[in-house]
Every structure is written in C-alpha cells, then in structure tokens.
Amino acid sequence: MTKGVLISAMKARKATLMRKLAILLAASFALSACQLFGGSVPSRVDPVAVTPQRLPNGLEEAIGAKENPRVVAEYGGVYADADLEAALADVVARIVAASDEPSRRYRVTILNSPVANAFALPGGYLYVTRGLLALADDNSELAAVLSHEIAHVIANHALERAKVVEQADIVARVASDILSDPIARDAATVSSQMTLAKFSRNQEVAADRIGIMIAGRAGYDPFAASRFLNKLERYAAFRSAIGADDDAANFLASHPAALERRDLAIRTARQFGAPGIGETGRDAYIRDLDGMIYGDDPSEGFVRGRQYLHPRLSISFTVPPGYKLENTRKAVLAAAGRDTAMRFDGVSVRATVSPADYLASGWINGLEQGSIRSVSTGGGLPAATASASASGWVFKIGAIRVGPTLYRLIFADRRGGGALEAALNQTLATFRRLDPAEVARLRPLRIDIVSVKSGATVASLAARMRGTERRLELFRLLNGLDGESSLVAGRRIKIVVD
C-alpha cells in the first residue's frame, strides 16, 4: 500500500463504493492483458480464426518499448533472480524455435508481483509474474503459458484488439451524442461491448490452440495447458474475497469458460498422443523456485491472515473475523461477503490538521452532521470517526494521525447497522505503531522446497505454511494436489515460510 489520493466511490454519481472495491480487488489478481480464465463463451467459436495483420518490425518495437516502463512500474518493478531468469530464457528459446516464426526475438521479464499474471506486448515483450511462477509446478506448465503469449504476438492480437476497442469507443460516443432514446442508446453500446468481448474470447481460444501446438512441437507435455487452466481456476477461487461477480460489464469482458477451454486444450493436446507424452521438467523447475519471495513485497507491507503490517511505515492493524484482506499498490482492501467492504490508505496532511478536522474538511459526500467523534486507537494514536450515507450505502470512516500522515479506514455496507460501526471500532482498537524489534523480525514470505519424508501427510506439511489462514488449501494449490491426492516419499514440494 502506498500513499496517495483516495479515489472514493462516495464521490461517484453512478457507482457505489462496493463496486469500486470489487473492481480493485478483481484487478489485483485478474490477468490484465491476457486472462487465462474467465466467464462464458459463445456456443460456436472457431479456434483458428486468426488473420494476423503485420506491423513493421520497427513500429512493433516502438510500441513495446514505450509501454514497457509503464508495465514494469505497474507490477512492482523487475524481480531479479539469476537462476529463474536463465530457466525462463531456456524455455523461451526452445518454444520460439518450435514456433512458426523462429527468427522473432523476445525479451522475457519477471515482474515483482504476487498475482498470477502473464502477458505480451508488441515487439516481443513477454512478462510473467513471480506469483505465476510460484503457481506453476514444472517447465511444461511454464511453457504452456509462454507459448500462449507468444501466440498472441505471432497473431498480432494487440493491434487487432486496439482497432476493435477504438471502434467500440466510437459507437459509444455516437450512441451517447446522437441517440435520444435511452433504450436504443444502451442497446447500441451493449452491442459494441459484446462484439469486443467476443473478439477477445476468440483471440484467447486461438492463442490456446496455437500455444499448445508450439509447446508440443518443442517437446513439452502438451497436456500441461489443461492442467494449468484447472489450477488457475482454483487460484481465482482462492484469491477471490467476494465470490463470483455477476456484473454485466465483467461478463461482457470475460474470456471463455474454463471448462470449455480445458476441453479444447485436451483435444488439441491429443494430436500429439495420450497423456504422459512430452517432457515436464519438474525437478529442474522446482529447484529454481527455492527461496523466491512469495506474496507481498516488503515495500508494500505484509498481509498475514487478517493482520496488515508495514515495516517501513511501522504500523499494524487487524480486521475483524470474516474479513479477507487484499494488499494492492494503491490501498489495502478487505471484504466480508458481497455487501461489506473496507479500504485503507494514507495521505499527507499538514501537522496542524487533526483527524476530526480532516473528516470535516469536505472530502466525504453524505457526511452525517454531528457524527464526527475524536477517539484514540488501541495503540494510543489520535483518531476520529464519522458516519456517512450515499446511494443506498452506509459508511463508517476512521482517520488516524501517525506523524505527517493521516491513515483512512472506510467501511461500507448496504445494510448499515451496528455491525459496521463495530467493525471499524474493532479495527481501530488494533491499530498501533510497530516497535523496532517487531520491524526487525518482519520478513517476506518465501518458497521453500523440501523433500517429502516417509510418513508425512498433506495435513502435516500444510501446517508448516505461513502467511495465510487457509494453509491446507494453499498448500494443495501450490503443489497441484486435489482432495484425493496423497504424497509420495522423496517428492519435492513447495511450502511457504517466513
């Protein structure tokens, strides 16, 4: 979480705070340039309906070079690890040699982000996050992801999508400016959105098929793509703090359903033979993961179950039971079901401005007159609380002074009532400064590779996991185990330690 200006949905006329928080939460683990899992798919999709439109190499390179710094900054910078970088370079070289354009050059970058993400830019810029590397279990799964992204580059999907986005924007502007009938205007806008959504889904299906063919020709297990799609679907469910979202905009922007994409992936892989064919490269891959940072980077603070700790800012707080924390670059978010959410961030304010003065300064829409109260946190820090309501939502807001910074806690709920106020008060009661000894003990989580000993069980190894209240679920997810799986002595597995 970094300091910044709060973008509060209390100031939005046509949106709610929950929707804003839901979008922010989803953005923290959704694949931005290329989702590998998503919503629904048309009943008839041509998986090879690709008509590449080549850009001059210089122009492709210029586009990628311009966007590269923005992408790196957005995803926490570059994660430097010589062994992982060398392993990725080997996989990329092998699959590029097996592609339809073996002379193309690619630059692969590991992004310092805990979310599972991979995407490509024109000019051969490939990106994979350390969160995705932690999720993958062998070189064939990594090859499946990278081949999918290379397929997007070969098919020039970035240019094609940009043209469709431009067309959809034009339709929306014309519908808004010319059509007076709101029904006709909305129908025109939705139609253009559906065209864009279908276009994206067709691109993803095409990249699935092309990528599997590339990875299979390179000698990797072609069934790795279907395995990884399964894992990504489980990962999405694990990371989601608010459950499934039936928002129409998210549905229209979604990609093919995981089940249908897995079916396509399996049919494509069977062209190479039965399951068991091809190389997985698990031992080498697992070895290179040993010691990699897992989860939040220290510069963004740490989420430990329901507790948030920031070593540089020397602050900590804990949300009530039922809330699930999510750390993002702009704010710390939490949700408790679909109708209750929390946002925490900070802003620099003059030392003469008290927390109560700040809450009364006009940045809160719907502020209830007389609701501002000066209080102290459980750690003795000066604070203030207030109530607000807008657009059918109830808000309980807290402001805490720590040196030159005012930290803000905003709880939102459709129903209101005492539960929301209790949640704010409980969180304020835990808000405190960390002492130097506590800061010194804080360490990032890391992947530790261990060999399964005779007699060890999934439960006993999962009990060694740190940084999550759902240890068993995360252990199974990281190691590709389902509820029926058992462990084999000598097998090397991943656990998260601090």
Image (cartoon, helix red, strand yellow):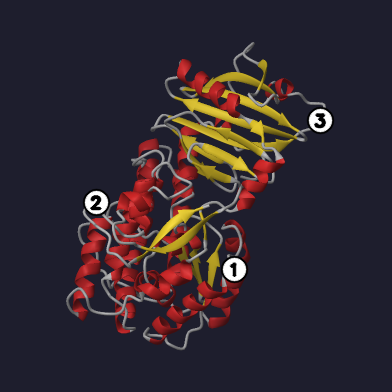
| Residue designated by label 3 | 351
**Crowding near the residue tagged with mark 2, few <14, some 14–19, many ≥20 C-alpha atoms within 10 Å:** few
Instruction: Name the side, left or right, on which 440 lies relative to 308.
Output: right
Q: CA distance from mark 3 to mark 1?
A: 39 Å
Q: Secondary structure at mark 3?
A: loop
- Give the Cα distance between marks 2 and 3: 55 Å
Judging by the rendered image, the residue that carries numbered circle 2 is: 483
- Numbered badge on residue 427: none
Q: Amino acid at mark 2?
A: Gly
The residue drawn where x is 53% and y is 81% is: 56
Q: Is residue 236 visible?
A: no
- Front residue (pair 457, 213): 457
Q: Which mark is residue 80?
A: 1
Residue 147, given in percent of the width and then of the height, sits at: 38, 74
What residue lies at 18% left-to-right and 79% top-to-bottom? 273
Left or right of residue 262: residue 360: right
